[in-house]
Amino acid sequence: MIPIQTTVTVAPDGKAAIELPSNILPGEHKVLLIMEEQSISTQPVVNYNAAWDEFEQLIDKSTVDTEIEDMAHQHDHYIHGTLKRDT
């Protein structure tokens, strides 16, 4: 007897698909199948609105007010010390 832990996918018609390790020889085998009562969700259920709200809250918490209006346009000046651009 070889204990194998894997996931079985059961179709609506009751047929099951199972992936076995490559060391199992081809042919017919007797199998004892013990299944957990609840199925495993392959895709986690995500509430995208809640996730997006949480992301926006994180951005709001992380925002630093530098009081510099032209930071993006003049980033070379503020970061590298170059002369400010004219435009």
Image (tube, rainbow, N blue to C red):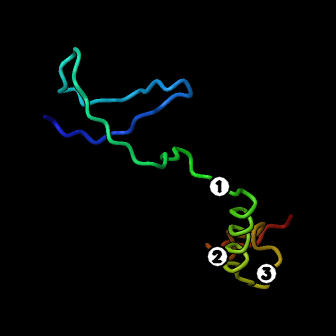
Q: Nearer the viewer, mark 1 or mark 2?
A: 1
- For the residues labelled 3 and 2, say whether their Cβ atoms are less than 8 Å apart: no
- Check disc 3 and report the residue beneath it: 68
Q: Nearer the viewer, residue 74 or 49?
A: 49
Amino acid at the residue labelled 3: Ile
Of the numbered discs 1 and 2, the one sitting upstream in the chain is: 1
Cα–Cα gap, marks 3 and 2: 15 Å
- Check disc 2 and report the residue beneath it: 81
Of the numbered discs 3 and 2, the one sitting upstream in the chain is: 3
Amino acid at the residue labelled 2: Gly
**Residue 52 location (% of width, % of height):** 72, 62
Q: Taking 26 as reference, is 79 left or right?
A: right
**Residue 50 location (% of width, % of height):** 72, 64
User: Secondary structure under badge 2?
Assistant: loop
At label 3, counting other C-alpha atoms closer than 10 Å, the crowd grade (few under 14, some 14-19, many 20 or more) is few
Res 29 quadrant in image: top left
Res 66 quadrant in image: bottom right
Q: Nearer the viewer, residue 66 or 63?
A: 63
Residue at image x 69%, y 80%? 61
- Check disc 1 and report the residue beneath it: 46
